[in-house]
Amino acid sequence: MDKTLRFTLDGRPIEARLGETVLEAATRAGVMIPHYCWHQALGNPGNCRMCIVEVEGAAKPQVSCRLPAREGLVVRSISPAARRAQCSALEFHLVDHPLDCPVCDQSGECGLQDYYMDIGRYKSAMREDKAHAGKRLALGPHIMLDQERCIMCTRCTRFVGQVSKSHELGIFGRGHRQAVDLVPGRALDNPYSGNLADICPVGALTDRDFRFQVRVWYLDSTESICPGCSRGCNIFVHTSTRRPWQNQGRRLARLKPRFSPEVNGHWICDEGRYGFLDFDSKRLGRVMRLKPVSEELSWDRAAQEVAAALRRKPVEGLAVAASGALSNEDWLAFKELFVDTLQARRFLFAPEPDQAGTEDQLLRRREKTPNLEGGKALGFGTKIESLGWDSLAGDIEAGKVWGLYVIDRDPAQAWGGRSRELLERLDLLIYQGPRQCLAGELAHYRLPATAWLEEEGHFTNFQGNVQGYQRALQPLGAAKPDWAIFADLERRLKP
Amino acid sequence: MITLLTEHFNEPKLHELETYRRLGGYEGLKKALVMGREPLMAEMDKSNLRGLGGAGFGAAMKWRTVTPEAKDPGPRYVVVNCDESEPGCFKDRVLVTRSPHQLIEGLLIAAYAIDARRAFIFIRGEYEVQHGILRQALDDARAAGFIGKSLFDSGFSCDIDLMRGAGAYISGLDTALLETMEGKKAWPRQPPPFPTASGLMGRPTLVHNVETLSMVPHIVLQGGVWFARLGTAKSGGTVLFSVSGHVERPGVYEFPMGAPLKDIIAAAGGVKAGKKLKAVIPGGVSTPVLTAEELDTPMDFEGPRAKGSFLGAGGVIVLDESADMVMVAHNIERFLAHESCGQCTPCRQGSFWHERILERGLNGGGTAEDIATLERAGENITGKVICALGDTVGVVTRALMKKFPQDFKDRFPQRHG
């Protein structure tokens, strides 16, 4: 399909596609040539001059981000001359850079630091007073700008021009006095603004939520999938557990996009990025019987009692409320317990009406749970219909439903003021989930489940891509994965 | 001595259409339209006309590289670069003030040659008077039928628009000028593609300096061979020099290509007040300095190049013995730092760094290490930036340091302890 051609980079043959630049082909082959302004999704303005290389037969060194790969081209990126040119470009970047690494949140993942250690290591010859510019400029709800640290790579202005198409940022002024800033009257509040902190190669644009909380070298990174909507953006979860006294004790420090060409490209949305920061709030860790006598139970005792309670009355009167937040593993155990073994008839897994949120052309999907598709593969939504909250309320009022098993959903969101009355009518209410809610307060049995980051699993996104996520954190208290709770009950209920 | 562009400058009303017509104006356009495109191009080929905005690229070659209609159907444009901002250059201002129709006529011939139906004159924002003159000239020419539909009943139509700059030196660079015309920040593009393939609005565009286009009617009327013979082997015709600095009579002087530098200075009355000559900047501040020993340099595109400098846009700045070359360097670098567009880092940061080091030297705080820093930083800018402005930042001070080392040693002495 694509025509390939070969050139030589530092003595090594590199294959390039027709139309690719030397920098693109090298990056694809795993050879890193220093660069700031080039970004795979944002083009190659060629303004940072870092990716400068020596080309055999050329009079001047060339920037590899604008050098088309040609058959037989001989390129040197680590020769003394190329290194000298890259080092001098770095020196110019640092002429007026404040060098405030000790208080800069980018420290540890900063392009200036990385290349200084790699190709710089020179003694500064800059003896003049550094130029000053704006500090601590809050551009919007999520992003803070430090104009002094900016190296003018223009990635941010290109992002708001080409990706979010919201055009809040511009470059104002000229020469050394110019600066990135907001267009007058605007705020950086587009739904993808968090990506700017990711693409900024230095500490000019930082994440307001992350600022001054924890040093990046204390973070652990885990591959995961965002559960914020049915797109299933690939992400890295950055967790902070080695310095529990930092970051206000938050274990989940931040989410970062992980490149996935077919799902989310390089980006994630702000809803997903900042939607899980209260990950550890209202968490449940104890296995409880609350009614008729409140008592903390062992898992064994609880499973025994719950299994018996589920069989107490005819299964026609038992309703099960789950959501698209279950993993594929959970869905399978769910089906084996409730459909195959108990043969329950009343299921509710459709999203609440207000769960249907904003959708756009870039990433965000209307369906705000990650894995309705996974349930669909097992018949939920095809062979098995979902009740609505209203009809379930009607059935409870009519006395047709005596028992309700709620898995990580809050009926109060659908029922509002009627919730307490409806839930209290039930003979049996079981709540299973990671966080406390009204159903958890009124339940007869409350079973603590692990939250998304505490267990590995798979989500199937709206395109049908089955994507795995890893365990990033340890479960809290006695919490068990949903599938393990279902499997335990199923074993006890099997004839 | 033959002059072309300034031949009728003693006519007080040369800028008026009536006078210009009386002196044979627009006859070149008529002749070009009658002779046809290929014969016109043949004359241009023979003329050795070079781009007089500074780059010296062969004009006929440039016209021929404009992507032909057959290969890329759609509009193509001619843009006149009248954003003359190089310190030391003021010949375009004089040409537009005195003889605007000469430019319009040359522009129309070029437009005809590449079949452009639309042309633009981009004039420096500060040239207010010249903008008025040019607008009047365009109105008059349009009213007289020299601009518009089917010129001289040839079937060739062309209209000309006038645009004003917003005050940035860098807009004088062809690709930055095109960006400005499109309403963007004046940040130079990085060819390829060159404007002749993708210029204004992505269309094939011929960008020429005022002086270059003003030469064209003369080539058409007198013939390419005649024109070429006025100059040197590779640079045809004449060239305007804007002479300024320590001379008796600063002004614009027209000379055949290849005239010795000393003749040009002599024409301007020689060094002011009988002082000794110290240095000459031959082509505007972005060209490296020449010393008093280099006055025999023939002023065509090849002559100054042999001495490590450039003809540039012919802005001859004469400096007498009182000049302090550190002050000269500071003055130029301060200008370049002010005008650097800020797009690429070595120029944006390097120019301001140069300015600050030189300023410290002038304020008595210089040391010998600064000379090494200037040398190294300059070397690291030139050839590693997007456009010629950046190259200049690195070249200018290094040339001054090389040719006048004592001036720099005085300001940047060896210090002990």
Image (cartoon, rainbow, N blue to C red):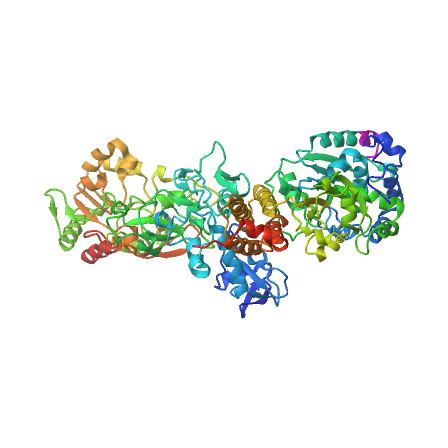
Q: Is residue B97 above or below residue B1?
A: above
Q: Residue at x 20, y 54 (%)?
A: A489
- Which quarter of the picture shows residue A393? top left
In the displayed structure image, the side of residue A342 where residue B157 appears, left or right:
right
Q: Is residue A3 above or below residue B385?
A: below
Q: In terms of depth relative to the viewer, which is nearer, B39 or A34?
A: A34
Q: Residue furthest left?
A: A293
Return the x and y of residue A46 as percentages of the image width and height.
56, 52
Q: Which residues are magenta?
A: B140-146
Return the x and y of residue B322 as percentages of the image width and height.
64, 44
In the displayed structure image, the side of residue B212 where residue A280 appears, left or right:
left
Residue A122 visible to an observer of this rendering: yes
Quarter of the figure with the C terminus of chain B = bottom left
Q: In terms of depth relative to the viewer, which is nearer, B172 or A391?
A: B172
Q: Is residue A230 magenta?
A: no
In the displayed structure image, the side of residue A122 where residue B191 appears, left or right:
right
- Which quarter of the picture shows residue B376? bottom right
Q: Is residue B142 magenta?
A: yes
Quarter of the figure with the N terminus of chain B = top right
Return the x and y of residue B332 as percentages of the image width and height.
61, 44
